[in-house]
Amino acid sequence: MPRQPTIVGNAVLLVIDIQASAFMDVKAGIPVMPGYRDNMERALKVIAAAREAGLPTVYVQEIHRRDMVDYGRELDGSEGVHCMDGEPGTRLPDEITGQRAEDYFVPKRRYSAFFGTDLEILLKGLNAETLILIGGMTDVCVHYTFVDGHQHDYYCRVVGDSVGGTSPAAHQASLNAMEYLQEGAIIDTEAAIAQILKLKREAA
């Protein structure tokens, strides 16, 4: 197969788990790589570009019930209790991300934004073909969402310096794994912004 363009058809921005904890000094329950907050700050530029271009934006939020009935096997590995409903770090910080009423919101109980949510119904309604992913964690929720998107035949693009992982090694390994599935999947922030704003110009 020839290498595909960065954006094919209608694009949608998936903001994966950019929750208040991304901008806090202490991340409850989950290890983060050095520079994680810098990457989340960079992701805000992608959100701003999507807003300028009128690109549909979906805010995905991992959130768990306080009685912990929906964590499942998530606590069997390296992660402790995280993203619990009502905790300060769990909320979506619209004062930082600029989330608006016309944006879309998908809560999830598992890592993939597709698993047990209505994301697929939403994407079909938006006639999406290309998914642009930013947020965290590169090696967990971003990676799992990418794989499910890939298996649903979406063109998936990850903004490599606007996602952050649990460690530098895990971050890079997941970027490599996603690039393996779709050549050209990993792009940087400046390239992503340029491609998004190009859509605005083409629509004018």
Image: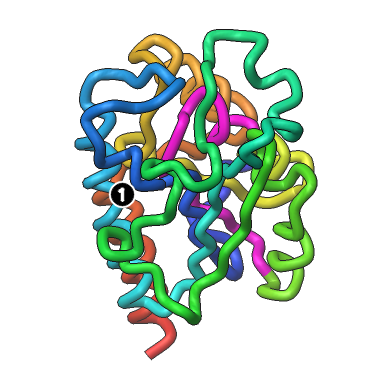
Which corner quadrant holds the N terminus? top right
- Sort mark 1 into few (<14), some (14-19) or many (20+) by Cα contacts within 10 Å: many
Quadrant of the image occupied by residue 87: top left
Outermost front residue: 67
Q: Classify residue 93 as left or right of residue 23.
A: right
Q: In this view, does 122 lie above or below 185?
A: below
Most foreground residue, 102 or 8: 102
Residue beneath the point at 76% across and 42% down:
115
- Residue 120: x, y in percent? 76, 58
Q: Disc 1 marks which amino acid?
A: Ala
Residue 138 belongs to magenta span: yes
- For image coordinates 31% across by 77% down, the residue present is 52
User: Compared with residue 86, is residue 201 higher up or lower down, i.e. above or below?
Assistant: below
Q: Residue at x 56, y 69 (%)?
A: 104
With respect to residue 202, does 80 lie above or below? above
Residue occupying the point 52% across, 17% down: 80
Relative height, residue 13 to residue 41 (above, below) = below
> Magenta segment range?
128-144
